[in-house]
Image (spheres, rainbow, N blue to C red):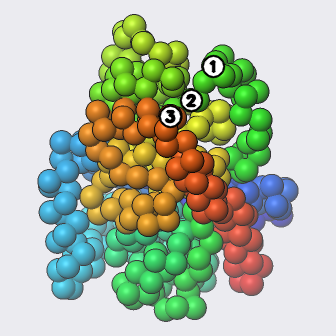
Amino acid sequence: MKKRILFLMSDTGGGHRAAAEAIDEAIHYLYPDRYDTIIEDLWKEHTPWPVNRIPDAYPWMAGPGVPMWKLMWAISTTMQPLPHKFVFPGVSPVLRRRIVRYFQQTNPDLIVSVHPLMNHLGVRLRDKAGLSTVPFMTVVTDMVSVHPTWICPDVTLCTVPTNPARDLAIHWGMRPEQVVVTGQPVALKFSRISADKVELKRQLGLDPDRKAVLIVGGGEGMGPVFKIARAIAQTASQAQLMVVAGRNRQLKTQLDAVDWEIPTKIFGFVKNMPELMGAADILVTKAGPGTISEAFIARLPLILYGYIPGQETGNVTYVQERNAGILAEDPQEIGQLVRDWLGDYAPLLQQMTRNAASLARPQAVLDIARHMHDLIEAN
Ligand code: UDP
């Protein structure tokens, strides 16, 4: 009989679902017909209104709400005892009962959390559901700046994307033997990107002779994507543009209405990010961990136009220290950088392309799947 794996996540941004789906694909790829898998947005599907709407505030938190987010991050990482320790007692009995019932109905052989808010709660409710012998694994999807909510020493195993993330996990209370550095889980399709950039450009209807700049604002199309696209179009006349608005419909409408100075393709939420990255020569993005890790695999140097203070702060340092990209928050400056990198500073661009490629960990998602399999086998 097939064993069952339950993924706990929530759609705050695009990264958590992308990670769960990437691992899901890897486990079926490595162990065909061995596992049934369920990816569950525990928050949206199992909490009552208005609690189930809280994840919808994420784009606001990452935009106009940044000062409040910063404050919350500072309090939640410095107060003692850490405030999330009170979250479990604060969860209403109705809510707990619902989730416990769901765990009992699902009866998983392994629980995998890919979200910072699913660890403490997940472990406690697993135990309440009478499933304490079921292994629980945390897959941290923040590259460097791991928030303490990710860290629950009662889990069986915790994987992290980088060495600095492992150090922080141990700092927040994990035992060293519980934490494994695997890299960020990225969908296998990124490791299958064709190396033929010119052909990929043709397939996407781009000009095969022009360097292409891809702009992505995470799954939600966050940040000054419109201003950046306009600045590049007006400054870097040798470039062509691909702009991904993600789920941000307003941004897509705004971009569609422009008469562009350089060849430009506008996309909404895309399913073919590997092809877009494969065709691109430079990626301009917010410092989302998923997008950055995908860019490394696609050998793409980065211009980071912004980051969510807290969980994405360390990503900027990680990229800059390894000279795989640069932080530039002003759209005009980004336009000039693109113009220079595609002109006089071409050797710098080539060096950064090599550096980005050296940070790629395409095997990470397979390693994570192997750890999951081992946990189930050992139980
Ligand atoms: N993404 C996608 N289609 C889009 C925009 C984004 O598939 O149109 C994916 C992107 O490839 C990445 C994820 O959404 O896997 C975004 O994750 P990241 O961690 O970079 O940022 P978040 O949106 O979680 O803040």
Front residue of 278 and 65: 278
Where residue 206 is drawn, which disc sits there?
1
The residue type indicated by label 2 comes to Ala
Residue identified by numbered label 2? 212
At numbered mark 2, what does the secondary structure look like: helix, strand or loop?
strand
Distance from disc 3 to disc 2, alpha carbons, whole Å, reads 13 Å
Q: Is residue 97 above or below residue 255?
A: below
Q: Amino acid at mark 1?
A: Leu
Task: Give left or right: position of 146 versus 90.
Answer: right
Q: Which residue is pictured at 31% across the width and 38% down the height? A: 333
Q: Quadrant of the C terminus?
A: bottom right
Instruction: Confirm or deny contact between disc 3 and disc 2 (CB under 8 A).
Output: no
Image coordinates for residue 85, horizontal then vertical, percent: 27, 79
Q: Is residue 262 above or below residue 372?
A: above
Residue type, label 3: Gly
Does residue 282 lie above or below 18 as drawn?
above
Give the Cα separation between the discs numbered 3 and 1: 20 Å
The residue tagged 3 is 343
User: Is 371 left, or right, of 229 in this rendering?
Assistant: right
Q: Are marks 2 and 1 in contact (CB under 8 Å)?
A: yes
Q: Position of residue 67 (x, y in %)?
A: 14, 53
x and y percent of residue 78 in the render? Answer: 20, 79
